[in-house]
Image (spheres, rainbow, N blue to C red):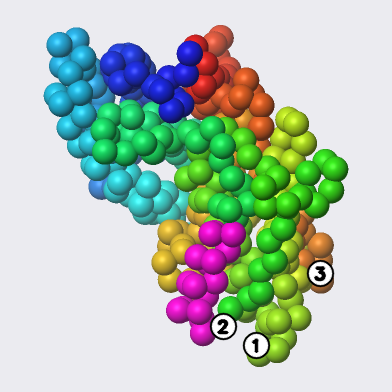
Amino acid sequence: RSWLGEFAEPVQLAEFLCKEMPVRYAERIRNIEQLPMPWQNFEELVAVHHLQLAAFQAFQEQPRSQWERVEAFRPVVQEVQQNDKKTKFLLMQAAQKMRGNSTSFTDPFSLELNKFLDDFLLSRLGCNMLMGQYLACTNHDSHITSIVNQCDALDICRKAAEEVQRRCATSQGRVPTVHVSAYSSSGAVNEDQVPRFSYIPGILMHVVRELLKNSCQASLELAKTQAELQQMPINLVVCADVRHVVIRISDLAHGIPRHVGSRIWSYLYSGSPTAMTGLSFGYGIGLPLSRLHAKYLGGALDLVSLPGYGVDAYLSLPRVETDLVENIPDEDVDGGRVSQELNLLTL
């Protein structure tokens, strides 16, 4: 029986939130308190700690009579989500301050800080998705839910490309060419045969948009004229078989410098000083956040840089419903860390 699909039962989901959310918020509170430096010295971390504690208390203190009534519990979830909007930016500000003037991205502290941010933001993403699903399924004026059973990957990719191109025109005055096509295991497909699968459209849009933004930005920085830009088209291909949907985004912007290497996955590294207005978080965290979004439901994001040629980005997502599991950090067993897996479509 689906509880994160189209026919989710609000009372059942509310009960799950009241049991699960305090656990996840408590883990994030503990993660802050176990940082290897005095977290109280950073006002942004103190603010994040306060937000996590307030959310923990909001869910922990809900009696059964409260969460069984949508009109009573829905405002609680809405307030928690609204207050959480500042968390990501506060974390990034705190991380930059904690790192100080260090130019290394591989020192033990930077690695530990990235691990903390990865776990914290992945857990936060899971909470927001679950709360968002509850708000969606209790909105009687809307049939929109987090997970769509027939998610149209090609349509989402086209919309992402159009949005990024509009932003390019506004902020840069030039627009890279983006070709979008789709294929199945048997070859090119017609419009009525495009790959569809159960997924969260918001996550797919977020990742594809970020990857396209990076390719467009790199192309714009390399091409000096519009004529040169037209000779550097970006190709987006949506492919699928019975188990996976794979999206490849290829550009001709000469690749990622070799000295950068794995820094692109660091929350502490910003590659472009001229990121497009409205498409960047301002802290260089687009790629690591995109990989986190892909990982959340069992997917993967990889980049292959071809020096002097361009970059291929590969986004792989599960197409089988039984593979669509929530993958979040969970507290350890015998000193190690494990991933909690929760099937989002079936009990």
Q: Residues within 10 Å of mark 3 (few under 14, many from 20)?
A: few
> In the rendered image of this protein, does residue 138 appear above or below residue 93?
above
Q: What's the CA distance linking mark 1 and mark 3?
A: 19 Å
Q: Which element carries disc 2, helix, strand or loop?
A: loop
Identify residue for label 1: 226
The answer to whether any part of residue 233 appears in the image is yes
Q: Earlier in the sequence, mark 1 or mark 3?
A: 1
Front residue of 76 and 184: 184
Identify residue for label 3: 309
Q: Which element carries disc 3, helix, strand or loop?
A: loop
The verdict on residue 172 being magenta is: yes
- The amino acid type, in three-letter code, at marker 2 is Arg
The part of the chain drawn in magenta is 158-173
Identify residue for label 2: 174
Q: Position of residue 235 (x, y in %)?
A: 73, 64
Q: What's the CA distance linking mark 2 and mark 3?
A: 21 Å
Q: Earlier in the sequence, mark 2 or mark 1?
A: 2
Examine the residues drawn in magenta and state their main secondary structure. helix
- The amino acid type, in three-letter code, at marker 1 is Gln
Q: Position of residue 6 (x, y in %)?
A: 43, 28
Q: Position of residue 291 (x, y in %)?
A: 59, 44
Q: Verify CB contact (< 8 Å) between mark 2 and mark 1.
A: yes
Q: Verify CB contact (< 8 Å) between mark 2 and mark 3.
A: no
Q: Which element carries disc 1, helix, strand or loop?
A: helix
